[in-house]
Image: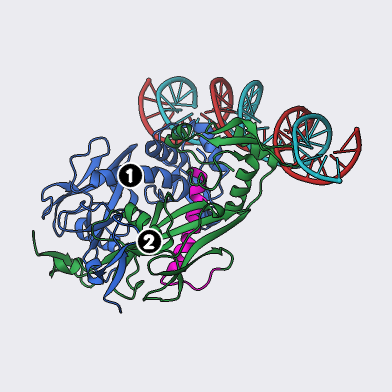
Chain colours: A blue, B green, C red, D cyan
Amino acid sequence: MPISRKVSKARIEQDDFYSIPIDEFFKSAFSVDCVIFGYHEKELKVLLIQRGTDPYENFWALPGDLVYPFEDLDDAAKRILNDLTSLSDIPMRQVHTFGKVNRHPLGRVITIAYIALVELQDITPLPSNWAKETKWHSLKKIPKLAFDHKEILNECVKELQEKVMSEPIWTKVLPEKFTLTAFQELFETILQREFDKGNFRKKINGVKFLKRLDESQKNVRHRPSVLYKFDSKAFQQYKAKGFVFDF
Amino acid sequence: MPISRKVSKARIEQDDFYSIPIDEFFKSAFSVDCVIFGYHEKELKVLLIQRGTDPYENFWALPGDLVYPFEDLDDAAKRILNDLTSLSDIPMRQVHTFGKVNRHPLGRVITIAYIALVELQDITPLPSNWAKETKWHSLKKIPKLAFDHKEILNECVKELQEKVMSEPIWTKVLPEKFTLTAFQELFETILQREFDKGNFRKKINGVKFLKRLDESQKNVRHRPSVLYKFDSKAFQQYKAKGFVFDF
DNA sequence: GGCATTTTCGTATTTTTTACAAATATAAAC
DNA sequence: GTTTATATTTGTAAAAAATACGAAAATGCC
């Protein structure tokens, strides 16, 4: 195992290399930040924590922390979300890595952002470990955030909008059996545009992984809506062909 | 600056925290791997280097190296590609971060993958620094690769197929003025399916950011093709609306 | 000029989208 | 019971787009 290697003098003099000890490279850390979007009744929120530790003590921030040296990234995301908010069983997806040199005051820390989408009412985050407080914040009024978390959040909103069209990231938001109206409203909220009810429904009926059930709503004072469910097996075939909703 | 912080005993005993020195977190490194796809005459290749240093000396690998502690990720990608292959001015896009614990024998190293797409004939990579050799490898026969680079490559092929539909990642492949036949062949190669010539053309003509010029091919022994060019300004509006080709 | 070649245009058919209206199913009010 | 309010569901006519072809056009070369 070499203890040093040739590296370029970064953009000072091309073709001119000098040696720096390889140990110098192993002085960085990385973190995971979890962007948990909460949906409820046509409103989209994001779960923030109030930091109870330096740096940025008392600031609102995305739930995030340093990854252990012996921990896989996806595992770290789960563990960190659970550490700070007591939440578990929330499937998250990696979306982007943010790596500006001075984004963290304690040293070089790059952060990998993960997103998830849940029904607000289904879960009750509880602050834990160094998180003083957890709170759902409407996307329309986000306070000043720690680190570069505002930038991360903005990017993740875009990623959510893209991902919701091609991946079943929305399955945790809806009950197992759901109405097409609920499905439509969810997409309208995330994508910020409206669809014609009848035509939206026609498109859905052409999509095999949304299965119409022989069951309908109860106790509604209007014509009850037929219930649908997501067929993940059928979805696999769509995914293989590069499926994207064409709303 | 705190020298330690409470952390959970990762998945051993929930709700039980102990302290480990914060320095322990700052013993990792990260690298960038560049997946440069080269296109030429209906064939897609990827640029690999032969490693001239441990670990994995003499193995074929994606051009990649450790990121300096004082270096932004996007800058590192450019610098590293240039260090190893002498290439510059190749716009790359971050696609995914790979972070399995034991993916690197020298310690904890996560790697951020970047992709780009270029015309093979336009550039001449030259091995430099610790790269012994550079070579374009057909995607159909990839040798055994260093680290987890095979897995990274496979994932990046999928990302390329997705990105080519929504982002002008293809602009560096085609000359400034190009024929629709060339454009079509490029997409057929990347997506691995074929399109009807006349109908493909009709779709393109409905897309405003592909501008038809008052100019056509010269010195071809058949009816010359009209040339088109990419209008990046017009594309911005498409992008804002979440444009995706619907081939 | 005729030939080979590939682009380009045209068109008839089918399919999908769109916009909107009418019919339907339920609970609750009368 | 009958009516009413409400939202779901179906239907449909017009417009638009996709599809599958084939014919016409423009070039270099013989």
Specify the segment rendered in magenta: B142-166
- Label 1 element class: helix
Q: Main secondary structure of the magenta part?
A: helix
| In the foreground, A135 or B242 | B242
Find residue B182 and report its horizontal and vertical position in percent.
Answer: 63, 45
Q: Is residue A19 above or below residue B36?
A: below
**Label 2 with label 1: CB-CB less than 8 Å:** no
Please, what is the three-letter code of the amino acid marked with disc 2?
Asp
Residue at 21% of width from left, 69% of height from top?
A: B27
Residue A24 falls in image quadrant: bottom left
Quarter containing the N terminus of chain B: bottom left
Provide the residue designation for mark 2: B83
| In the foreground, A25 or A55 | A25
- Label 2 element class: helix
Residue B145: say if magenta.
Answer: yes
CA gap, disc 2 and disc 1: 30 Å
